[in-house]
Image: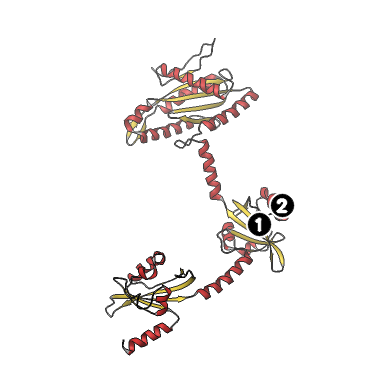
Amino acid sequence: MGSSDSLLRLIADSVPALIAYYEVHTLQCQFANRRYAEYNGWTPQTILGKTVREAIGEAAWAMIEPHVRQVVAGKTVQYVREQTLPDGTQRVIEVNLIPHLDDGQTQLGAFVLISDITTQWQAERAIRDSEERMRKLAEATTEGVVFHHNGVVTDVNDALQGLLGRTSTDIVGRNTLDFIPERWKPTVSEYMQSGHEDPYEAAVLDTNGVEIPVEIVGKTMPFKGGTYRLAVLRDIRARKAAQARIEFMALHDTLTQLPNRLYLMERLDSILALARRRRTAVATLFIDLDNFKLVNDSLGHHAGDALLREVACRLKLAVRDADVVARLGGDEFLIVLTDIASPDDAGLVAVNLIESVSVDVIIDGRAVSVSPSIGISVFPDDGATADELIRHADTAMYRAKNCGRSNYQFFPRAGLSHGSADLTP
């Protein structure tokens, strides 16, 4: 080894940094000072010829491979990462990867310069930890944080300002209840005064007066020689929306968004209870689509689903907002007409439904037509409960099917002569 090489080795081994040089194409180590080699469990001689992956190990390679790809592409890279040494010691290092270019700007390799910043990092972390303990992670969270003393706001974090759409100058110095809707003020006030620290739900008002549902957790803590309250506010709009969606889907048909059988039974029970008190009539219309299976078989389920969605829309448009339109399953629907004057009202609605549903539906450029067969039962004459009314309307629907389809029939009560409105020629 020449004197210049010896001097280079002496200098490289004397500096506190970790130094290495890798060839760009093979990523093999061409030089490493003693600190770099020993840091990775090698000697300056045994590390030569090792690839980056071999030199630093699989775990470290998995972490830094994207950075290596960048320097191979000619980019200067700097990053900080934690490293576990072969003896298990945890260290923090700052890494600089510098491309080596010749005079013609052709990349030959890459210099690696690593500084162990563990001591510096630990000192900075101790400061950060102290501040975070004091402020209860106020600025280390995306959740809104507010400090208040006897209800008066003393400090807020950026997340809370963003949540309310206000600056800190608009919030600090005001009473916390100024940002709480009236209906939630008793709950929030009691929570603060009692010193509770368990989470609870409430709401806050943004700068436009819009209520934002939040989950609040309060903590009592010493601060600046006094006792303060810290409150962490979590925006739960997404959670509420998800809960509402789950609740909606539990009671509605996923395809048509109409109420399902469970919702229908609950609603119909309530409608009948009200009708008993008011001594009014209620009609249930059981609807089955004629020839729907033919549409499914010939055009596929996609067309069948599209047809069901369109029929659902037409059924809703044909009745009042107070009435209920539900999908029982398959091609069966049920409509509840509330507070009708007479069975004739139900017959008129059935006529409109048949006319509306029978209009062609264009699906994938093709005209598709179905017609409904409708069975009608009327409360209280045809049944006293939801189950009875639906069962009797179902019976009447099959009667409509047997009468040629595309018509409606009333449930035949014993001893009574029911007229039926048959729309078929």
Q: Residue at x 45, y 81 (%)?
A: 16
Please say if 173 is above or below 272.
below
Gap between marks 2 and 1, in whole Å? 12 Å
Q: How many marks?
A: 2
How many other residues sit within 10 Å of disc 2, few (<14), some (14-19) or many (≥20)? few
Among all residues in the image, which is located at the extreme top? 415
Local SS, label 2: helix
Asked where in the image residue 97 lies, by quadrant, the reply is bottom left
Spot occupied by residue 87 in the image (x, y as percentages of width and height): 47, 70
Q: Position of residue 145 (x, y in %)?
A: 61, 60
**Residue 320 visible in rendering:** no
Percent of width and height locating residue 1:
31, 86
Judge the density around disc 1: few (<14), some (14-19), many (≥20) Cα neighbours within 10 Å. many
Circle 1 is placed at which residue position? Answer: 218
User: For the point 59% across and 57% down, which residue is it?
Assistant: 164
Which tag, 2 or 1, sits closer to the chain's start? 2
Element under disc 1: strand
Q: Residue at x 65, y 51 (%)?
A: 181
Which numbered marker is on residue 17? none
Residue shown at the point (41%, 83%) measured from the top left:
13
Instruction: Looking at this view, name the residue that lies furthest to the left.
Output: 104
Way the structure is coloured: secondary structure
Looking at the image, do the residues carrying marks 2 and 1 touch, with CB atoms under 8 Å apart?
no
User: Where, by quadrant of the figure, is residue 341 drawn?
Assistant: top right
- Which amino acid type is shown beneath numbered disc 2? Glu
Residue under label 2, please give it.
Answer: 190
Residue type at mark 1: give it.
Answer: Gly
Q: Quick check: 22 above or below 275?
A: below
Query: For residue 146, what is the image quadrant?
Result: bottom right
